[in-house]
């Protein structure tokens, strides 16, 4: 933890053996608290999560990892991190072998629901169920299925998951699906196999990067209703980047986004987009050294402070490896 009021004083909270290059150990504040954080770890042959009060030092461990927390701060949804490591390096955790390595769509793993108070974990959507439900284009006998990129809705009633399955050429296809918190009422929001980064706008709408909607052939940022193929409109065509990491701010009038490396200098550009005026404001250009590629790449992953006055990004542009940088947007939006 970094104390911005004490000259960026570094405050160690703990250690972890469950992390990856793209999403770390899922360290995050617990909603509804002012001083509790949670992160994933590995203890012997299982993944766990630690809950720590950063003020008192009180700590407890629950016997399963977490991915996304509900706004109520009492429950979470999670995935099989060993499975994800097998199917999508850079997002799962090393050290524990996928129990179902030889099973293309196992019934015994998938998305789980976790009680943060008791530590109880329940499988609610299996990989087998995903592989057999709805339209799954180009689903070959050799396609290996996994689910991750989970995010609870603002009202805590539903969550998003990305269902991905491998292709013979080494790539993968992706469906964006929503579910009730108990795993019921699956809705196939993007079913054509081309979904990417997303964010809830509100409890009934999702902004996602997708391909092949509203007569377009390429990728774009599209708003969807939370229903099967619930396309509404394209947002920021030709202005808002169609490949970055999305967040809403300021009563959903603005979108925070970034870009993948572009051009000879591999510039990454975090930017703000004003929806009512179709205006984009770039927050800087950060060159990514050529050695940061693939699983080891450094996306800027822009995220907002709670008061929406600062943006924190990851970047390796300073020549000091991966570092965190703060951008002041107060007065910009």
Image (cartoon, rainbow, N blue to C red):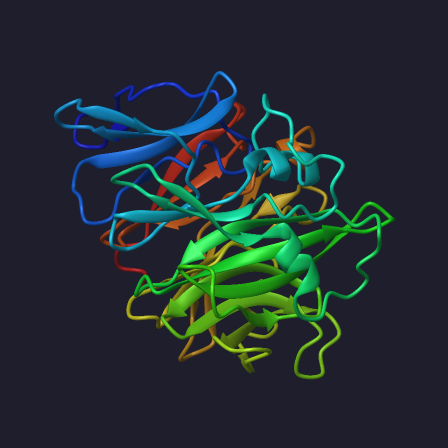
Quadrant in the picture for residue 193: bottom right
Q: Is residue 244 left or right of residue 48?
A: right
Name the one closer to the observer, 223 or 191. 191
Q: Identify whether 306 is placed above or below 225.
A: above
Q: Is residue 310 left or right of residue 294?
A: left
Q: Position of residue 54 (x, y in %)?
A: 19, 28
Q: Which residue does the image show at 34% across and 65% down from the upper left?
A: 157
Q: Identify whether 313 is placed above or below 124.
A: above
Residue 7 visible within the image: no
Q: Position of residue 278 (x, y in %)?
A: 47, 76
Q: Which residue does the image show at 59% across and 43% down from the upper left?
A: 108
Name the one closer to the observer, 32 or 291. 32
Q: Position of residue 214 (x, y in %)?
A: 66, 83
Q: Identify whether 217 is placed above or below 130.
A: below
Q: Position of residue 189 (x, y in %)?
A: 57, 72
Q: Quadrant of the N terminus?
A: top left
Quadrant in the picture for residue 109: top right
């Amino acid at each position: 933890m970094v104390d911005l009021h004490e000259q960026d004083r570094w405050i160690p909270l703990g250690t972890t053996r469950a992390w990856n290059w793209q999403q770390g150990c899922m360290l995050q504040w617990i909603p509804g608290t002012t001083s509790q954080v949670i992160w994933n770890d590995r203890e012997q042959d299982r993944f766990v999560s630690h809950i720590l009060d950063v003020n008192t030092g009180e700590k407890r461990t629950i016997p399963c990892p977490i991915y996304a927390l509900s706004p109520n701060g009492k429950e979470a949804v999670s995935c099989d991190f060993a499975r994800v490591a097998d199917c999508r390096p850079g997002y799962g955790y090393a050290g524990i072998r996928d129990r179902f390595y030889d099973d293309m769509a196992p019934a015994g793993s998938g998305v789980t629901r976790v009680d943060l108070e008791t530590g109880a974990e329940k499988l609610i959507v299996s990989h087998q169920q995903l592989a057999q439900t709805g339209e799954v284009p180009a689903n070959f006998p050799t396609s290996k299925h996994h689910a991750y990129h989970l995010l609870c809705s603002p009202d805590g009633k539903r969550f998003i998951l990305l269902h991905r399955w491998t292709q013979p050429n080494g790539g993968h296809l992706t469906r964006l699906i929503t579910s009730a918190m108990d795993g019921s009422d699956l809705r196939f929001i993007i079913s054509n196999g081309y979904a990417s980064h997303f964010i809830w706008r509100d409890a009934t709408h999702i902004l996602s990067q997708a391909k092949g909607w509203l007569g377009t052939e390429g990728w774009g940022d599209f708003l969807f209703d939370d229903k099967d193929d619930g396309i509404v409109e394209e947002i920021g065509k030709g202005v808002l980047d169609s490949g970055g990491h999305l967040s809403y701010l300021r009563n959903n009038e603005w979108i925070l986004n970034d870009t993948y490396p572009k051009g000879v200098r591999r510039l990454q550009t975090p930017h703000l987009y004003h929806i009512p005026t179709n205006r984009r404001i770039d927050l800087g250009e950060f060159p990514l050294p050529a050695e940061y590629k693939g699983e080891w790449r450094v996306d800027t992953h822009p995220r907002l402070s709670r008061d929406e006055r600062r943006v924190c990004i990851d970047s390796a542009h300073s020549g000091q490896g991966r570092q965190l940088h703060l951008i002041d947007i107060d007065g910009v939006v």
